[in-house]
Image (cartoon, helix red, strand yellow):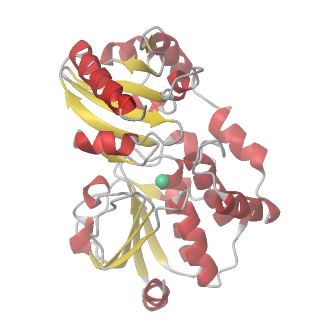
Amino acid sequence: MIEILRLIEQSQTFLIASHESPDGDAIGSTLALANALREMGKDVVAFNRDGAPVEYAFLPGHATVVDEVDASRTFDAGFVLDAGELHRAGSWIRERCRCLVNIDHHPFSEDFGDIYFVDVDASATGILIYRLLQSAGHRLSNDVATCIYTAILSDTGSFRYSNANPEAFQVAGEMVAAGVDPWSIASGLYESQDLARLRLLGLSLATLRISSCGQYASLAVTLDMYAGAGANEEHTDRFINYPRSIRGVEVAIFFRQLAADRFKVGFRSKGNIDVGALARAMSGGGHHNAAGAEVPGSLAAVQEWVYEKVAELLAGHR
Ligand SMILES: [Mn+2]
């Protein structure tokens, strides 16, 4: 931590990046740190290879997130947030930053930086940004507090997941005390969806499958459905919560078609079932209760294979 504080003090130009297809924690922690550094008078580029999704447009600084960085630019310091592995943020970042910092809460987060600040007990990377800014003695502005609150809200599933620990509530409470309005953030995140998203959800819900034991269930989205709904992959965020919400379901699975014969398979589990280990066995990655991997094959073949693996995982828990 001292090393990071010293780095911030001694640097002027910063690159801040997070993982591709960013979620609320990736974008929230990126913008929390970017806004805070800008308040300190630093020169900051906030980057995500997929840009900042429109659903986070309410976050202060959203419009400053770029999806490309001029090839000639180098930075005194780079921060890679919530990424797990450097390539999920952009491998080129390594050579372009004099000093690189990895801030993350993913288990097995790669040690790619010069400075490694990883705590798997933090419910969100936004929590680690909070701790960092506290140590720096930086007074949290409403802009920064909004980003931190959103990061926590997003990664704890609105304080419903098992990672919603006392620190998550305590930091979120401090953000509210500092002026953050929970309703305006919740309405920005959950009550402002595109019509195309709801149309896509309608198509996807028709693919609901549940195992005969009732412990795992899945939804799928195909490329045809995007075309039918006028939607895209950004609209599938949180679809996996529907199979998970069924009584008795321990593992929810989401099959998202990437190409004719390739699927991204997302997993969410309840309680102590470790889908992170399952995803890593499929060359993917993630957390204990939220993980994913890419699997080649037709939908039917991928579903059958994944169902088998999940059944084995659950059998090990009995
Ligand atoms: Mn995260």
On the question of residue 57 being in view, the answer is no
Query: Residue 286 versus residue 69: which sits nearer the camera?
Result: 286
For the point 64% across and 56% down, the residue is 165
Q: Position of residue 202 (x, y in %)?
A: 52, 12
In this view, which residue lies farthest toward the top?
206
Q: Position of residue 295 (x, y in %)?
A: 22, 30
Query: Residue 234 versus residue 288: which sits nearer the camera?
Result: 288
For the point 51% across and 18% down, the residue is 201
For the point 40% across and 34% down, the residue is 267
Residue 127 quadrant: bottom right
Compared with residue 234, is residue 53 higher up or lower down, i.e. above or below?
below
Compared with residue 106, is residue 5 higher up or lower down, i.e. above or below?
below
Q: How many marks?
A: 0
For the point 22% across and 43% down, the residue is 283
Residue 229 quadrant: top left
Q: Position of residue 178 (x, y in %)?
A: 79, 66
Query: Residue 234 versus residue 254: which sits nearer the camera?
Result: 254
Q: 99 left or right of 251?
A: left
Q: 177 left or right of 165?
A: right
In this view, which residue lies farthest toward the front?
318
Q: Position of residue 175 (x, y in %)?
A: 73, 62
- Work out which quarter of the rendered image holds the C terminus and state it: top left
On the question of residue 126 being in view, the answer is yes
